[in-house]
Amino acid sequence: METYEIIIGIVTAAFLIFLRNANQMAHRQKVVAVRLNSYLAYWKSLILERDLFKLFYVGVSWNEEIREILSTGGKATDIVKLEEEKKKLLEKIKESLESDQERRESLNTAASEALSKIPAEYRNEILNYLKATEQNLIDGKTYISDEDASYFDQYTAHECIALKMRLISLMSGVVILLLHAAQDEEFDMNNYSSEFKNILWQGLLVSKGIDILSTSMDQYSSKSVLLLTLDNMGL
């Protein structure tokens, strides 16, 4: 009888520890979900301010296409094929930019006008600002840390970290293009079509990631601590 009671006691203690850990995780998930939602709202506002909604919508549509593939029993190869189609689309845009002289001249004029409005002494400050923004992302000052991301399920954690890295890649691409533009007296977009294509691609991935995480964070935020606790326990 004593042995039986000891076993029951050990099992009960183990369950209570498991329950406590699951509950603590649920509380952390709620807090981090609210923080990340705020950061995502900030990036969305920047997209709207810069009139980049069309690019953002392409990323949203891409996610919808993936969901359609999965809902109809599609395979991973179908999703990979879809990504290749998006890359081909960007390659066509790049080729169009290189071959369409009127569009290229229009972009060159717009870039020259934009740069001419920025005094030379302020250009370095703009570049420093972009670099500081990038560093703040890395340090978790304007985004959640990798540790925070680990509180979510594996897929969501992966998307959190991937979005951060893509934001950094996007800003690095913009910094490089600005440096070239500022130093090139006769700036020609045709000479930087590959860099421009890379910026567009990173922008697509960023918009795709923001859409995925916005949906995921809404789900985490809408669930009660009790439901999250049960999910963490696999119940």
Image (cartoon, rainbow, N blue to C red):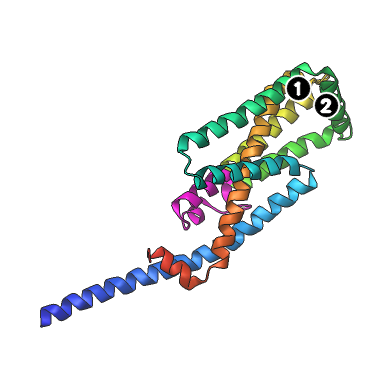
- Residue 178 on image: x %, y %: 75, 30
Q: Amino acid at mark 2?
A: Leu
Q: Is residue 108 visible?
A: yes
Q: Residue at x 54, y 65 (%)?
A: 30
- Residue 91 on image: x %, y %: 66, 24
- Residue 74 on image: x %, y %: 48, 40
Q: Quadrant of the N terminus?
A: bottom left
* 216 relative position to 98: left or right: left
Q: Residue at x 77, y 16 (%)?
A: 99
- Could you say which disc has been placed on residue 107 in the image? 2
Q: Residue at x 27, y 75 (%)?
A: 13
Of the two numbered discs 2 and 1 in the rendering, the one whose residue sits closer to the viewer: 1
Please check the rendered image and state whether residue 144 is part of the magenta-colored stretch, yes or no. Answer: yes
Indicate which disc, 2 or 1, sits on the residue closer to the N terminus. Answer: 1
> What is the magenta range?
138-163
- The answer to whether the residue labelled 2 contacts the one labelled 1, judged by CB atoms less than 8 Å apart, is yes
Outermost residue on the front side: it is 72
Q: Nearer the viewer, residue 112 or 158?
A: 158
Please check the rendered image and state whether residue 106 is part of the magenta-colored stretch, yes or no. Answer: no
Q: Residue at x 62, y 48 (%)?
A: 210
Under tag 2, what secondary structure? helix
Residue where numbered disc 1 is placed? 97
Q: Amino acid at mark 1?
A: Leu
